[in-house]
Amino acid sequence: MIKGIKDAQFIEEFLMLHRNEVYRQSDLLRLIDWKISLKLNNINQYDILFEDHYLQSFRIKICCNELPTCANLKKRKPDLYDENWRCNFCKIEEETFDHFWKCSKIQNVVQDILKRLKIFLVKIIQEYSRDDIDTQELKGKINEFGMWDIGCLYDFTFLMKNQVSCQLIELLRCYKITEEKLLYKVLKQITGGVLLEFKVLIWEPRNELQIKEEKRCGISGKDKKAKSHSKRTEVGVKDVGCNILESNWNKWNDLAFHRGGH
């Protein structure tokens, strides 16, 4: 009884964090198959290979809005990063995870990622479906997905968070990809592929630019590791440790999953 109450309190406190406000949008929640998404997170949590652990940590930082973008760095260490720090690509807009997908300087990269994801969806459904497939019909159904409209309520970037749309699940089931192990195998390949593309094609080039700019400004690795003593640090902003972040995220997923995904 006491454990159940504490678990419920933990879930409520976790959801009320500012970075998790997305999970309080009822219109968005209806677009995601939470039962499958939470189980997918649990599978990744417990079956993950050692060499994939970094990628899983990377995913959790995206889920919790904890990637060290300039927007977050300015909140955590305002003594090092002033308001002039902007997107490393366009140098104009605030650098956030959401901005990367709209940044004018890397739209060619974003469109390439979208194109390859569409091709991959066709390929993987053809590979695992038990049906004879009309390729043009399948391409048409995939192109009709609302998630290709970046910035809409649910777009394809949610796949990086293992948050799978009901629309995608319906498509997989339509092509007889229904057996549980096969379904999760396919979903892991889809979500993992998108995450890896973002990491390699956007995040790593961004990091190279960030390091160059930090060197130009005289910011050392030692400076970045030091605790910020600035009075300008935003109230309630903490540089959350990776282990604590992962532990809390995994605990929330585990508790939510065992309560039926609601």
Image (cartoon, grey):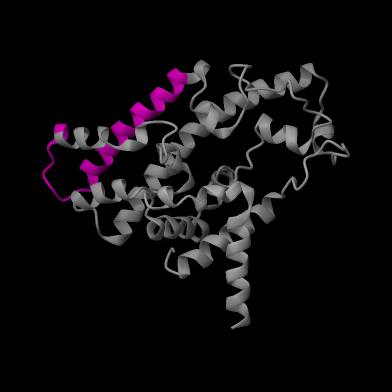
Residue 165 sits above or below residue 114 on the image: below
Q: Position of residue 13 (x, y in %)?
A: 63, 61
**Picture residue at 51% right of the left edge, 52% below the top:** 23
Q: Quadrant of the C terminus?
A: bottom left
- Residue situated in front as seen by the camera: 179 or 255: 255
Q: Which residues are magenta?
A: 107-136
Q: Main secondary structure of the magenta part?
A: helix
- Residue situated in front as seen by the camera: 103 or 24: 24
* Badge count: 0
- Residue situated in front as seen by the camera: 7 or 37: 7
Q: Position of residue 238 (x, y in %)?
A: 75, 47
**Picture residue at 77% right of the left edge, 27% below the top:** 81
Q: Quadrant of residue 219?
A: top right
Residue at the limit of the structure toward the front, as seen here: 26
Q: Position of residue 175 (x, y in %)?
A: 19, 49
Drawn side of residue 87 relative to residue 259, left or right? right
**Picture residue at 52% right of the left edge, 60% below the top:** 253
